Amino acid sequence: MTGGVLNTINIRLDAKTIAYILDHSDAKVLVVDRQLHIEVKKALSTLKKKLL
């Protein structure tokens, strides 16, 4: 399979919800704005898989 899909995530979501979205979207890469890194870092610590 080629290509990619952009899956935007609302910046107002909490870490638990972000982790759920990432787990269920089959994401492989995550691009995050520096201002949002704290909440995303919390979400990444609970993921079952590693992202780039």
Image (cartoon, rainbow, N blue to C red):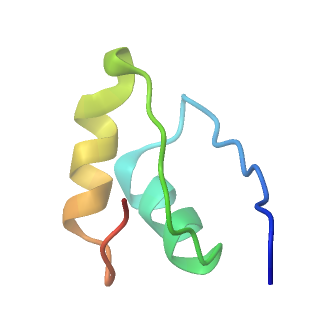
Q: Where is residue 38 in the image (x, y as percent from the top left)?
A: 23, 32
Tell me if 38 is positioned left or right of 43 in this view.
left
Displayed quadrant of residue 10: top right
Displayed quadrant of residue 49: bottom left
For this rendering, which residue is in front, 16 or 37? 37
Instruction: Name the outermost residue toward the front.
Output: 2
Q: Where is residue 40 in the image (x, y as percent from the top left)?
A: 34, 43
Quarter of the rendering occupied by the C terminus:
bottom left
Displayed quadrant of residue 48: bottom left
Tell me if 18 is positioned left or right of 47 in this view.
right
Tell me if 27 is positioned left or right of 42 in this view.
right
Q: Where is residue 36 in the image (x, y as percent from the top left)?
A: 37, 25
Quarter of the rendering occupied by the N terminus:
bottom right
**Image position of 30 with respect to 19: above or below:** above
For this rendering, which residue is in front, 29 or 26? 29
Taking the spot 60% from the left edge, 78% from the top edge, the residue there is 26
**Image position of 48 with respect to 17: above or below:** below
Taking the spot 50% from the left edge, 76% from the top edge, the residue there is 23
Taking the spot 33% from the left edge, 19% from the top edge, the residue there is 34
Tell me if 10 is positioned left or right of 50 in this view.
right
Count numbered badges in the picture: 0
For this rendering, which residue is in front, 13 or 29? 29
Q: Where is residue 12 in the image (x, y as percent from the top left)?
A: 54, 29
